[in-house]
Image (cartoon, helix red, strand yellow):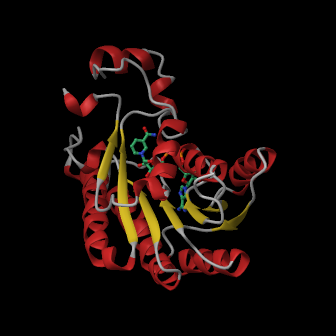
Amino acid sequence: MKLRDKVALVVGGSSGLGRACAEACAAEGAKVVIADINERGAEDTLAGIRAAGGAGMFVNTNAMDESAVKAAVDATVREYGKLDILVNSAGGPTEADEAGWHHQIDMYLKAPYYGCRHALPEMEKNGGGSIINIASLSGVTGSMAKVPEGTGYPAAKHGVIGITKTLAIANGKKNIRVNAICPGYIKTELTRPLYEAKDGGDRLITQRLQVPMNRWGEAHEIGKVAAFLASEDASFITGQSIIVDGGFMAR
Ligand SMILES: NC(=O)c1ccc[n+]([C@@H]2O[C@H](COP(=O)([O-])OP(=O)(O)OC[C@H]3O[C@@H](n4cnc5c(N)ncnc54)[C@H](O)[C@@H]3O)[C@@H](O)[C@H]2O)c1
């Protein structure tokens, strides 16, 4: 129980990697608040957490709306008295067009910024904390975009790593650690069209991308890294972008 008495806010915790982060933090004893637009998914996440003996609640939150993110932070502190851990993991499919570019920036850059901005003062009051931004391999290398409008995702994910490093420097003396996780190809709702593709989701991994571990990642393999980063086991790790990709970037 490495997160006993801790309180975690997971933005995007109704599905996929956010759900896995919520479950992993709860399994280590944290109370978990799910901030998401998907209430049903949040209830599923929370049902699993409660069945395993954990506790948590849902706050309906559009991560792209700064006032809603602030309200989620406030609701967390009202309910559980403090905020120790923030995970920023909201996401969803977007078109590679002009509107999609702006949407990617709103979803993947501005939303984590809002989360950090409003969580940091609460963590400072509390004498410390841990922020985990879910970035991407597209935060450390270019994506396969064919048109300029397709650059929104890598631009935002590179930006999240900039936010992560900068806030880590700014908040180190306050004992607030800020890290990013860069997942490779992980099975979630977001990637379902890829791994369930008729022409072979496995072939994408084994032949086209040649992921050294030769398989898709599972969401819990990200969740456990988030729980580690949130815990005292990671007490001297800050400003880092941890790549969790089955060896893809090592090639
Ligand atoms: N799955 C992967 O392989 C992979 C790889 C690299 C990075 N990522 C990143 O992981 C994060 C999570 O993606 P996922 O794969 O778990 O997808 P997912 O679709 O399974 O989960 C995304 C969650 O975000 C929520 N969400 C969407 N829009 C929201 C909004 N406006 N406000 C609040 N919540 C919102 C959804 O309801 C859902 O619960 C994203 O930032 C994504 O870029 C995923």
Q: In this view, does 236 lie above or below 174?
A: above
* x, y percent for residue 94: 42, 49
In the image, 18: left or right of 247? Answer: right
Residue 219 can be seen in this image: no
* x, y percent for residue 158: 25, 56
Q: In this view, does 210 lie above or below 224?
A: above
Q: Which of 26 and 39 is in front in this view?
A: 26
Q: Which of 44 and 194 is in front in this view?
A: 44
Q: In which quarter of the image is the C terminus?
A: top left
Q: In this view, does 78 lie above or below 200?
A: below
* x, y percent for residue 126: 53, 80
Q: How many marks?
A: 0
Residue shown at the point (47%, 84%) measured from the top left: 121
Q: Which of 189 and 44 is in front in this view?
A: 44
Residue 232 can be seen in this image: yes
Residue shown at the point (20%, 44%) measured from the top left: 141
* x, y percent for residue 95: 39, 48
Residue shown at the point (40%, 72%) measured from the top left: 176
Q: In which quarter of the image is residue 72?
A: bottom right
Q: In which quarter of the image is residue 76?
A: bottom right
Q: Which of 43 and 167 is in front in this view?
A: 167
Residue shown at the point (31%, 72%) measured from the top left: 167
